Image: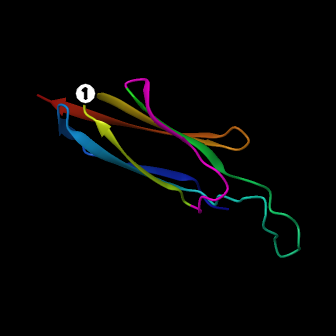
Amino acid sequence: MVTVQPRVQLPSEVAKDDIFEVRTLISHPMETGLRLDESKHVIPRHLINKFTCRYNDAVAFSVDIHESVAANPYVSFYLRATESGRLQFLWEEDGGAVYRLESSITVRG
């Protein structure tokens, strides 16, 4: 069994109105429900199906994820630095599990 481990990389400080990159990775097996185990039984579907980033409680980026995404999904996107605050990252899994990670950013100027 793989331990689900979300990770995020972004700058801690950015100039106002600069565009910065956010890189995320979550360790997750991403089973499609289409593979068989050694006993020829279907391995149940087990996917991260949605990723959302909130910047000071407003949705800044969101994506639906489907079967074609490989294990350990990597998502990279850009945001504009408007104000200092909190970034909240949410990965939603089939079955209702939600993995959360938070980070802060300081906007200068």
Q: Position of residue 45 (x, y in %)?
A: 76, 54
Residue sticking out furthest to the left: 109
Rendered-image quadrant of the N terminus: bottom right
The residue under the point 71% across, 53% down is: 46
Q: Position of residue 69 (x, y in %)?
A: 59, 58
39 with respect to 6 (left or right): right
Q: Residues within 10 Å of mark 1 (few under 14, many from 20)?
A: some
21 with respect to 94 (left or right): left
Label 1: element kind: loop
- The answer to whether residue 41 is above or below residue 93 is below
Residue sticking out furthest to the bottom: 38
User: What residue type is disc 1 on?
Assistant: Thr
Residue sticking out furthest to the top: 57
The residue under the point 66% across, 40% down is: 97
- The answer to whether residue 29 is above or below residue 108 is below
- The answer to whether residue 39 is above or below residue 51 is below
Rendered-image quadrant of the C terminus: top left
Q: Which residues are magenta?
A: 56-71
Residue 31: quarter of image: bottom right
Q: Position of residue 3 (x, y in %)?
A: 59, 57
Residue topped by disc 1: 82
The residue under the point 59% across, 57% down is: 28
3 with respect to 62 (left or right): right
Q: Nearer the viewer, residue 59 or 3?
A: 59
